[in-house]
Amino acid sequence: MVSPALGLPTLAVVEWPETHNDRVDEWYGLHWKTRALLACASGRSFIWIDDEIGDGDREWVSAHHDGRALLYRVEPQIGLRHNDFPALLDLIQSLPAESR
């Protein structure tokens, strides 16, 4: 879990849908997780850390999500590194205390 390492309480886990609409995702160049994450966020700020985030995901989130979002891509062979945490902490610390 990443949240304790950032000094946060244990955070909710996204329940992935059993099925997803591949046609919509492919048409817009989305990762299959994108629309489910936005539905779970419900306009709240969120950070998505993944090794498969692409431009289509960024564009979709920008167009369909009212809250703040950080889509943070990591290299699949490496994952999160120590020097990745400042960018994540910057977003967290910029949020109002009641949103953390």
Image (cartoon, rainbow, N blue to C red):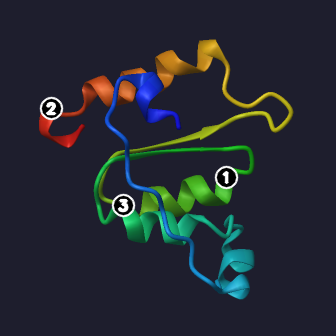
Mark with earlier residue (1, 3):
3
Label drawn at residue 55: 1
Placement of 68 over or under 62, stated as above or below? above
Separation of disc 2 and disc 1 at Cα?
30 Å
- Name the secondary structure under disc 1: helix
63 with respect to 42 (left or right): right
Picture residue at 36% right of the left edge, 61% below the top = 41
Q: Within 10 angstroms of label 2, few (less than 14), some, or many (20 or more) residues?
A: few
Q: Nearer the viewer, residue 2 or 30?
A: 2
Location of residue 65 in the rendering, given as x and y in whole percent from the top left corner: 37, 61
Is residue 96 found left or right of 1 in the rendered image?
Answer: left
Q: Are marks 2 and 3 in contact (CB under 8 Å)?
A: no
The residue shown at (71%, 34%) is 74
- Amino acid of disc 3: Ala
Q: Is residue 53 above or below residue 9?
A: below
| Residue nearer the viewer, 1 or 45 | 1
Helix, strand or loop at mark 2: helix
Per the rendering, the mark at residue 92 is none
Distance between mark 1 and mark 3 Cα atoms: 19 Å
Residue at position x 74%, y 51% in the image: 52
Task: Give the mark nearest the N terminus, 2 or 1.
Answer: 1
Measuring 66% from the left and 73% from the top, which residue is drawn there? 28
User: What is the secondary structure assignment of the residue under circle 3?
Assistant: helix
Q: Which residue bears the numbered disc 3?
A: 41
Residue position for label 2 = 97
**In this picture, residue 100 sits left or right of residue 48:** left
Image position, residue 33 (x, y; %): 61, 65
* Image quarter (top left, top right, bottom left or bottom right) of the C terminus: top left
Amino acid carrying label 1: it is Asp
Q: Could you tell me the amino acid type at mark 2?
A: Ala
